[in-house]
Image (cartoon, rainbow, N blue to C red):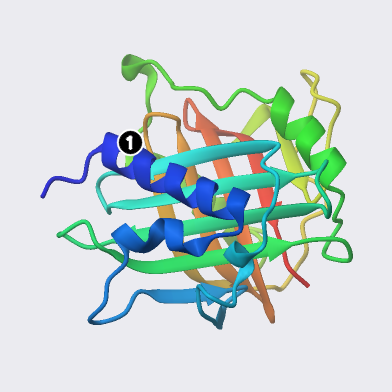
Amino acid sequence: AECTRAFLKSAADNLVAAQTAGDPSLLTALLSSAPATIYQQNEKPSTLTTGILTTAIKPDHTRHVLDTTQCATYTEYISATGAKPYVNGFQLWFNANLTLTKIDALTTTTGDWLFNATGTLNWASKENWSEIPADKRDSREVIKAAGDAYLDIFSDKSVVVPWGRPCSRLEGGAYTGNGGPNDRCDVGIPDNVKLVNRRYVIDETVGVVDIFLTFGSLADSHEFRVEGGKLRFVHTITPM
């Protein structure tokens, strides 16, 4: 079966419906039975029936990244005005039969790294992550390389990163700028940290790569919007 954008969007929309209702059974039609769909949360083995999808969370903002080449999706899920604030990220991975083989979930709430869902919602809702005209799109390789360069500079300051100007980083609820033309995201980057175990979901139509990774002992997502080969936006999710 062909992995289409329509299929992936429908699957990612089902995920949003499941999280909204706190009902993971809304994904049942997509699941694999043998072998069973792998579910991990914050880089630890877990189950759909005990994980974050059993919690009803109001979706104030959701955005999908659709990767037809790998048949995978990434969904950013921000909830600032419900019973409890959350910022979650999900990668869904499908096989050639369009069966869901793996759900990779990251969930953050009060007490996690720089957590402030109100700030996350405020800045994320002001940014433009819309479709890029076909003649201006970067290749998968360029988009992936831009994300990798950013992650590689954590351990090797000689790496050349394609910084855009402006470039804005949303880290938890903290923003490295004010949404203006002079925003920079080449600030506050640690030294001597290897970011490993990278899992990429890439969507050329919006110039985005989302990378789930291991950051020291922490699970983490770094998502990048690339425009004209340069980094424009960075979003991070880091459960503590």
Callout 1: SS: loop
**Residue type at mark 1?**
Ser
Q: Nearer the viewer, residue 135 or 206?
A: 206
Q: Is residue 217 above or below residue 229?
A: below
Q: For the C terminus, which image quadrant? A: bottom right
Q: Residue at x 75, y 54 (%)?
A: 86
Q: Nearer the viewer, residue 168 or 98?
A: 98
Residue 175: tell me if it is visible: no
**Residue 103, quarter of picture:** bottom left
Residue 179 sits above or below residue 38 on the image: above
In the image, residue 2 sits, relative to residue 89, either above or below, namely above
Quarter of the view holding residue 93? bottom left
| Residue identifier under label 1 | 139
Observer-nearest of 160 and 181: 181
Give me the residue at 59% from left, 58% from top: 151
Task: Residue at 48%, 51% (x, y): give it.
Answer: 15
Q: Is residue 194 left or right of residue 37?
A: right
At x 51% / y 22%, what residue is drawn? 130
**x and y percent of residue 43 in the render?**
57, 77
Q: x and y percent of residue 132 in the render? A: 43, 20
Work out whether 152 lies above or below 39: above
Q: Position of residue 21 (x, y in %)?
A: 60, 52
